[in-house]
Image: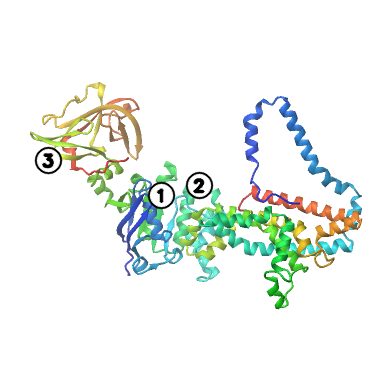
Amino acid sequence: MTPPATLSSSGAAYGSVDVVYGARHRFTTAAAITGIAVSVLTAFVGLPLLAIFLRVPLGTLVAQLHSPVARDALRISLKTSLTALLFIVVVGTPVAYLLGTRRFRGRTVLVTFLELPLVLPPAVAGIGLFAAFGRTGLLGAHLTQFGIRIPFTWVAVVMAQAFVAMPFYVRQAIAAFASMDPQLLAASRTLGMGSTRTFLRVSIPLARQSLSAGAALAWARALGEFGATALFAGALAGVTQTLPLAIYSEFGATHLDVALAMSALLVAVSFGVLITAKLLLRFQTWV
Amino acid sequence: MADERLEVELRHHLGRIDLDVRFSVGRETLALIGASGAGKSSVLLAIAGLLRPDHGRIVGAERPLFDAEKRVDLPPEERRVGLVFQHGALFPYLSVAQNVAFGLHPRARSKRERSERVGEILERFAIAELANSRPDRISGGERQRVALARAVATSPHVLLLDEPLSALDAVTKSRVAAELSRTLADLRLPTILVSHDLGDVAGLADRVAVMDEGRIVQSGTTAELLRSPASGFVAAFVGTNFFSGVATRAGGVTEVTLDSGVVVASAAAAAGPVGVIVQPWDITLHDAMAGAPSAGPPSADSGQNVLTGSVTSVAPRGGTLRVSVASLPPVVAEVSAEAPGVDGLSRGAMVAAVWLNAATMLVPDDAAAPTE
């Protein structure tokens, strides 16, 4: 479910190696080992995904998606993951712009810090959110005074998702803004556009495709979020139970068909997101 | 009419060099030429507001754009200074028409006014047929034209062009130069052209300022610079022959022993360290094998200087050929393409470069060695 944080824009690097050395392919022990390794890895990734679709008939999968549990989970997942994505894009874009276009002391430290959720175990993220925003938490204690309770609400789901998915967007956005041609920004300024207008009319259009790819990856990560959500938001059916949490609970309740149906949906969505992101990055045209 | 003059006076520490320039431009075109790293582009950026100088002031059309002492520093968008980048810096995601419309503020004009203005500009710059093309689908010359049109559309008070011709091939270059010359004459704005090649912009500029190491070392018309370069650097830069040596008076002529040991004669009087300038068009070339004027030490009698060597390059420039000769010291001659014997001027041909003593100009030598 977790796609890589940044994608290279093309596979040209591998292709060129082939052009240089590919002319004299001979069957060697090394080639045999490589062949076996490729088969093993492909099967290792492919079989579980294939098994989801082959375990029960396709008609059953589609029918089970209409079950109340699956429908609730799908609704909550869409609502929370899209809200998390909105938050990530609105807050992450200006931050990424700053980090991508300016050099200042502590920049590298800040970038590394913002990337931390990439490698942090999601359970740790969940505990952290709980310790900060929980009823007796660092900030949560004060929020409680105003009658604001975050844990075990859909807002908690959004926060858990935003926390773990944010770096996927921000990293891509930093790279996109860093690769802008500074002359285009300068040209915009001399043509009478202030820095805000220049950001909206030049930076955003220039980075548009990269930002979309980053957003797609972040959304996929938010959609798949499990660990942090489970700890900070729980799995209240109809409130905080997202698709991954529903898969877990249906699996535990031996409703394997429903779990498989929701899994199949997530496989399809993940595949679609990954392909979309790759296409966006490969064909950066201005049409 | 208000004074449209652009007054520039700025000092700025720029890594390796210290920028220190002061000049003013009326309704004319000033060419700022110099080697790369001389600070020419930084001057443009400072005027446009994209670089903040340490000291100085910039006034455009009686508006203070920058004043270090009075803490005036208008942002680029308020300066009304049009800047055209070398490769155009067109927005790749916008069509030609959208690029031209970019600087027309929606607040200042109605939609109809804007599209009328864009149409008028597209017509004026003869790019109407490209209106819907993307910048990556048009030629380098067209990009240059669109970039200029986009800058002019915003009615700037000052126009800055950074290396407007350098990115173009030779054929396009002369066509774009002719267009640019007409456009600039029409606009009659204070205009600064930056170039590393005087030949590119000589025809466009009313005045030329030569920059070296952050300073303007000489300014004047192209003819003035060619006729009397103030230093070895300028001479080398504008493409004349410049040598340094020591002059001694011998009879009716001045003999100058060049650094290479060769002695040349001049009709001008001088003594001590001097710079020797010989204009390329004062040199004639003769087939060295055909017993043309004999090579030998100059004398009052011969009245001319002869250096022999093989031709290293022949470059056409308009109706003339610019011929480099590997004599000691090497010289550059400009001969008419119609001159007799020109057909024999190919690489490797042995020639005698000849000029009259009267064509040997002497100037006080400066320490700066020619770098080109």
Q: Amino acid at mark 3?
A: Ala
Is B246 left, or right, of B5 in this rendering? left
Residue drawn at point x = 55 percent, y = 60 percent: A98
| Label disc, if present, on residue B163 of the rendered structure | 1
Tell me the quarter of the image containing the N terminus of chain B.
bottom left
Which residue shows up at 27% across the image and 27% down it? B309
Q: Residues within 10 Å of mark 2 (few under 14, many from 20)?
A: few
Badge 1 vs badge 3, beta-carbon distance below 8 Å: no
Tell me, what colour scheme is on the image? rainbow
Question: The C terminus of chain B lies in which quarter of the figure?
Answer: top left
Q: Which residue in the structure is indicated by mark 2?
A: B139
Query: Closer to the N terminus: mark 1 or mark 3?
Result: 1
Q: Farthest residue in the bottom direction? A: A146
Q: Is the residue marked by circle 1 packed among few (<14), some (14-19), or many (20+) residues within 10 Å?
A: many
Q: Residue B128, percent across and down?
A: 51, 56
Query: Whole-percent x and y of residue A269?
Result: 77, 54
Report in which chain the residue with disc 3 lies.
B
Provide the secondary structure element on which disc 1 rests: loop
Which residue lies under the disc numbered 3?
B269
Q: Is residue A238 left or right of residue B315?
A: right
